[in-house]
Image: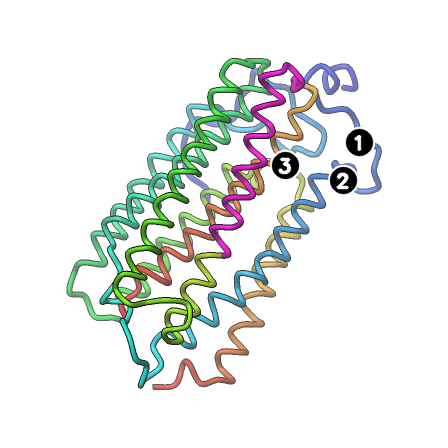
Amino acid sequence: MEQVAIASGHEDHGTVTGVANTKLAMWMFLASDCLFFGAFISAYLLYHGRAGQAGPKPKDVYSIPFTSVTSFILLMSSLTMVLALAAIQRGDYRRLRVWLMATALFGATFIAGQIYEFTEFYRHGLSLSTNLFGSTFFVLTGLHGMHVTAGIIWLLTMWGMAMQGRLTTADSERIEVAGLYWHFVDVVWIVIFTVVYLVPK
Amino acid sequence: MTDVQVPEADHELPLLPGEVKPHPSPFAYVIIAVILCVITALEVALSYTDLADGVMIALLLTMAAIKFFLVASWFMHLRTDAPVFRRFFILGIVAAIILFSIAMSTLHIFSP
């Protein structure tokens, strides 16, 4: 078993739990991040529809077709991320580099879409301080965008290491941990897309 | 976790420490991605219908939950990895739901 594990890049971790500490730490971070995003989603639900607010309302500014496309792009980035993990586990370093870059590009496209959306909202008179809807919307989606941006930087770092030949099958756990973070920002967006954009106001 | 019948594990890879079953094959990942896209398309289409708000909200939240669990169980490997990861994640989700449901109830968001 030990020989098989080392050949595939996963040594026996020798921890109390029997699993890698880095992976366990990432899962603990993601569990805490559920509470972080839960707070901002709750704040949006509480305040976006409060009566007597001046300025644009959700139905005045949302473009569901546009946001659907960016959501689709983020979903596809989860596929390319998991294909990057499969590639490094098989020792296919060319595909690893391709899928890592594809994931980063999908993420960058999502962020570009978000910047465009924010700009459009601002042109329609909605800013962070216009009303409670604007405050809670920009803080929630902006913090998610910051998570995606951090993920892109992480992916590009991994891609740079892969280009220099510094990522091998023995490092597949590093790709897996980065992937866990990336998939988490995707599942958070699944919730935001439904609760913020699609649920009737 | 949600169980979807697609081609199972990647048997070319050995069972790794901390895994209950091998990771899915790349083909299985593509099938899951297609299912996610179909559900997203259904969600968007549903949002343009004239269903009653209550029915629409219930359907949209159900579809979002299915997507959430598909990504968590297949792409994040919760269905094949050691249960300790799943327990941590579920703890975070349940804690968030309970905490913020109480907070929103206190602020009367569920009142008519």
Q: Which residue is mark 3?
A: A177
The three-letter amino acid code for the residue at tag 3 is Val
Vertical comparison of B64 with A9: above or below: below
Question: Is the stretch drawn in magenta largely helix, strand or loop?
Answer: helix
For the C terminus of chain B, give its image quadrant. Answer: bottom left
Q: Position of residue A27 (x, y in %)?
A: 65, 47
Q: Secondary structure at mark 2?
A: helix
Q: Residue at x 46, y 24 (%)?
A: B26
User: CA–CA distance between discs 1 and 3?
Assistant: 15 Å
Residue A163: quarter of image:
top right
In this view, the residue in front, B47 or A96, is: A96
For residue A21, which numbered disc appears in the image? 2
Q: Secondary structure at mark 3?
A: helix
Q: Is residue A58 left or right of residue A94?
A: left
Query: Pointer 2 indicates a residue of which chain?
Result: A
Residue A54: quarter of image:
bottom left
Instruction: Evaluate whether label 1 is on the same chain as label 3.
Output: yes
Q: Position of residue A188 (x, y in %)?
A: 47, 53
Mark 1 or mark 3, whichever is nearer to me: 3
Q: Is residue B32 left or right of residue B91?
A: left
Q: Position of residue A166 (x, y in %)?
A: 67, 18
Q: Which residue is mark 1?
A: A13
The three-letter amino acid code for the residue at tag 1 is His
